Image: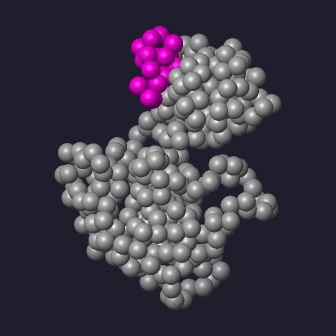
Amino acid sequence: MKICFYALRSDELLFCHDMKAKYGIDFVYTAEYPNEGNISLAAGCDGMSCTPCDMSEKVIRAFHDVGVKYILTRSIGYDHIDLNAARELGLKVDTVSYTPTGVADYAILLMLASIRRFAHTLKRAELQDYSLKNKLGRDFSACTVGVMGTGRIGTTVLQHLSGFGCRLLAYDVYENDTAKKYAEYVDRDTIFRECDIITLHMNANDENYHIINADSIAKMKDGVHIINTARGKLVDSGALIKGIQSGKIGGAALDVVEFENGLYYYNLMGEVMTNPKLALLRSFPNVILSPHVAFYTSEDVCDMVEGNFRSCYEFGTGKRPHGIEA
């Protein structure tokens, strides 16, 4: 068996060699994202591996035509993949899971940085502005934190927050007993109405699309802080901008944004920003933007690479007859 890795970084390559020996699966790779000029690299490979990128019907069909049988993504989310196209062509699709602590702790880092205006304070300190104007923060332990989505990452956030003294509320269609040890489950409107900080840990599906929108923001406490380390599609960027401009939203810390594909993970220094809403968000002193790096720890990278090798092995040996839609 063989996998063709796209957009492979040097830190991932080290783990690929380890997994090749562990699973007996060969691999080829390129640092480029899939495009018309490099899809032929996957000829003779059972699977192709990608990070979030354009995996539309046209791209998937091109991989099918060179003999690829498995579409493997080195991410938890798979909303970038046209699942209908893959299904019609008979391609199996699989995603990965990884240790939840990296993203969970990064979300807490963003919460603290947001309510203490940390990024703005550091920028001014670099210019030797040591005045206190517009640097007044909040006491974290006095805040009510709402965690929307209590899967592995959301539940880990609750576990790690339990030592800070915050009041913790949770929302999920499916409640779990571990989360109940740390938080009270409530409905969405209660999260919006009572929380000083709202952190998102939900899948990007049709039901959750723009779950943070003009209507939900109107229900929120004045000065609320929005944290997103999940998927950009969860937040209506236009509504978020209006909420920040009006003062309804006191701050936002976003590791993901809408329409980030083609921007994040590229060096675009000196180029014109093609996402006007992202450009506007960058101008706000109470907004923190990080380029989709919450997952980026050595432990998580290893898990993601191994996840693709494991999926290919299990598909090829019949241990997993179906992909993520099974």
Image vertical order of residue 45 relative to residue 185, above or below: above
Residue 126 lies, in percent from the top left, at 63, 76
Q: How many numbered discs sit on the rendered protein?
A: 0
Residue 1 lies, in percent from the top left, at 59, 12
Residue 264 lies, in percent from the top left, at 65, 51
Q: Is residue 82 left or right of residue 165?
A: right
Residue 255 lies, in percent from the top left, at 53, 57
Q: Residue at x 75, y 34 (%)?
A: 35
Q: Tell me, yes or no, if residue 72 can be seen here.
A: no
Image vertical order of residue 299 relative to residue 171, above or below: above
Q: Tell me, yes or no, if residue 315 can be seen here.
A: yes
288 part of magenta stretch? no
Q: Which residues are magenta?
A: 306-326
Q: How is the image coloured?
A: one colour
316 part of magenta stretch? yes
Residues 206 and 140: in front is 206
Q: Residue at x 45, y 11 (%)?
A: 318
Residue 15 placement: quadrant: top right
Q: Residue at x 41, y 74 (%)?
A: 218
Q: Is residue 320 left or right of residue 127?
A: left
Residues 199 and 24: in front is 199
Image vertical order of residue 30 relative to residue 295, above or below: above
Image vertical order of residue 72 relative to residue 221, above or below: above
Q: Residue at x 57, y 24 (%)?
A: 88
Residue at the top extreme, as displayed: 317
Quadrant of the snapshot with the C terminus: top left
Residues 310 and 302: in front is 310
Residues 47 and 182: in front is 47
